[in-house]
């Protein structure tokens, strides 16, 4: 009995080779897409990491500013009390305690930014809102600065005069005693920090 050799038709061999070529092309394309996706993911992760570092550094700067401003305010308040230039009575002690409470609040806002960023930003926003406007109208006056004040305001005693005022941590509060002053101003530093903190709140809420 003789052996019979079987050869597949030529068109079948050609079709198999075409399928193999197509399969190799699909595999190469899939590998290329996977590599691109992996590179894009790594690039996005790196960008997010850099953005988080930038946000963290900005929050740290605001925290240090508030802590230093609060400490400086407490030091200046104690210096005014015990320098001998001021009569220490119950009214002066109450005002000093009020000022000390606000400066301690500024320090706590800075510390909270290191522990809980979102809560610290909300408290810091409140702290800056208290500093953004200062005024004195007859028997009523209020001024609170924990840090730096670059003030732009209007003095209404001798007409409407626009004035710029610079000050470090300071506090003034008066009810019932006429100071003879009439002015209102805006702390540009506090106003800038309010917009800055609001932007950071938006970024940390995403």
Image: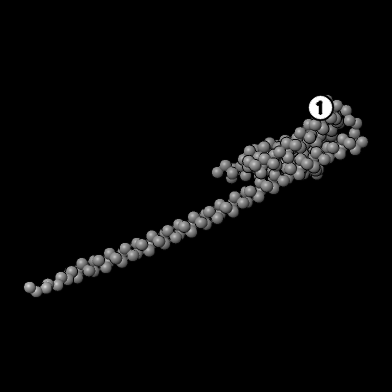
Mark 1: secondary structure: strand
Horizontal side of 7 relative to 168 (left or right) equals left
Residue 33, compared with residue 10, is above or below; it is above
Front position in the image: 136 or 116? 116
Circle count:
1
Quarter of the image where the C terminus is located: top right
Residue lying farthest to the front in this orientation: 1
What is the x, y in percent for residue 55? 62, 48
Horizontal side of 55 relative to 172 (left or right) equals left
Residue at point 49% right, 55% down? 41
Residue 191, compared with residue 177, is above or below; it is below
Which image quarter: residue 123?
top right
What is the x, y in percent for residue 156? 82, 35
Horizontal side of 7 relative to 129 (left or right) equals left
Quarter of the image where the N terminus is located: bottom left
Residue lying farthest to the right in this orientation: 84
Residue at point 71% right, 38% down? 108
What is the x, y in percent for residue 162? 79, 41
Q: Is residue 179 in view?
A: yes
Horizontal side of 49 relative to 105 (left or right) equals left
Q: Which residue matches tag 1?
A: 175
What is the x, y in percent for residue 164? 80, 43
Which image quarter: residue 16?
bottom left
Residue at point 42% right, 59% down? 33
Residue lying farthest to the top in this orientation: 176
Which image quarter: residue 174?
top right
Front position in the image: 85 or 97? 97
């Amino acid at each position: 009995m003789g052996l019979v050799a079987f050869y597949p038709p030529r068109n079948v061999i050609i079709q198999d080779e075409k399928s193999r070529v197509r399969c190799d092309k699909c595999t190469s394309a899939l590998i290329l897409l996977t590599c691109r996706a992996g590179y894009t993911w790594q690039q996005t992760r790196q960008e997010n990491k850099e953005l988080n570092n930038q946000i963290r550094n900005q929050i740290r700067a605001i925290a240090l500013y508030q802590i230093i401003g609060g400490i400086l305010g407490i030091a200046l308040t104690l210096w005014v009390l015990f320098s001998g230039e001021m009569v220490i009575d119950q009214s002066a002690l109450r005002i000093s305690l009020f000022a000390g409470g606000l400066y301690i609040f500024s320090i706590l806002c800075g510390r909270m930014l290191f522990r809980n960023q979102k809560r610290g930003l909300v408290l810091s926003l409140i702290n800056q809102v208290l500093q953004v406007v200062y005024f004195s109208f007859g028997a009523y006056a209020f001024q609170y600065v924990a840090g730096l004040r670059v003030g732009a305001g209007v003095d209404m005693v001798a007409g409407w005069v626009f004035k710029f005022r610079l000050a470090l941590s300071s506090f003034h509060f008066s009810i019932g005693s006429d100071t003879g002053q009439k002015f209102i101003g805006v702390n540009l530093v506090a106003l800038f920090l309010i917009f800055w903190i609001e932007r950071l709140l938006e970024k940390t809420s995403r």
